[in-house]
Image: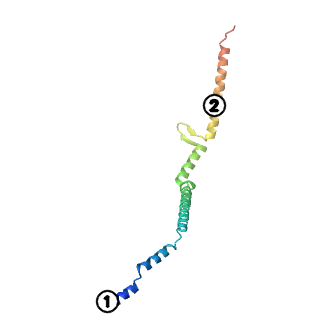
């Protein structure tokens, strides 16, 4: 029995009493400053949100710049060739149908000829009624 008592005393010395353990836990819980932790957490959340918004804007700006560089800044060689051919057709002379006598002329010259032809038709139409009235011979 003496041996059991000795072992019990050793266990009692090693394990603190329940009343001694509780104040130590309570004292550790009082070390935390909960309002300060909440404020830091909110500030961190706002900073993360601002960083995400800024990075999103930066991404869209870079995407737009890359799209402009790829699609609008450099024109494909095929498109440049087609445009130069069209420009030659608009500004140059060439045969459309040589046996039929049909030629292609620059657009500026075609507009000048069309305007002159319309002016001549208008002058002819204006002189016809006057000549028809004078040629009828009706005297009052």
Residue 97 at what x, y percent from top left? 53, 39
- Which element type, helix, strand or loop, lies under badge 1? helix
Q: Residue furthest bottom?
A: 2
4 left or right of 84 in image: left
Above/below status of 101 relative to 33: above
Q: Can you see residue 94?
A: yes
User: If the image is split into quadrants, where does the N terminus sit?
Assistant: bottom left
Above/below status of 104 relative to 29: above
Residue 112 at what x, y percent from top left? 65, 36
User: Residue at 63% of width from left, 30% of height from top?
Assistant: 118
- For marks 1 and 2, the one nearer the N-term is 1
Per the image, the residue denoted by label 2 is 117
Q: How many marks?
A: 2
Residue 30 at what x, y percent from top left? 51, 73
User: If the image is split into quadrants, where does the C terminus sit?
Assistant: top right
Label 1 Cα neighbours within 10 Å, binned few <14 / some 14-19 / many ≥20: few
Q: Can you see residue 92?
A: no
Above/below status of 136 relative to 68: above
127 left or right of 100 in image: right
Per the image, the residue denoted by label 1 is 4
- Which element type, helix, strand or loop, lies under badge 2? helix
**Res 128 → quadrant:** top right
User: Residue at 65% of width from left, 16% of height from top?
Assistant: 132
Mark in front: 1 vs 2: 1
Coloring basis for residues? rainbow
Q: Nearer the viewer, residue 114 or 71?
A: 71
Residue 55 at what x, y percent from top left? 54, 61
Above/below status of 48 relative to 100: below
Q: CA distance from mark 1 to mark 2?
A: 134 Å
User: Residue at 53% of width from left, 65% of height from top?
Assistant: 38
């Amino acid at each position: 029995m003496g041996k059991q008592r000795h072992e019990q005393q050793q266990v009692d010395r090693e394990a603190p009493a329940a009343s001694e353990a509780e104040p130590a836990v309570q004292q550790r819980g009082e070390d935390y400053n909960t309002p300060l932790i909440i404020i830091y957490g909110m500030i961190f959340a706002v900073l993360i949100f601002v960083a995400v918004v800024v990075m999103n804007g930066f991404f869209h700006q870079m995407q737009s710049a890359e799209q402009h560089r790829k699609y609008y800044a450099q024109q494909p060689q095929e498109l440049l060739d087609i445009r130069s051919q069209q420009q030659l057709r608009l500004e140059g002379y060439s045969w459309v149908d040589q046996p039929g006598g049909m030629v292609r002329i620059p657009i500026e010259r075609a507009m000048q000829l069309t305007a002159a032809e319309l002016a001549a038709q208008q002058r002819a139409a204006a002189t016809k009624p006057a000549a028809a009235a004078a040629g009828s011979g009706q005297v009052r």
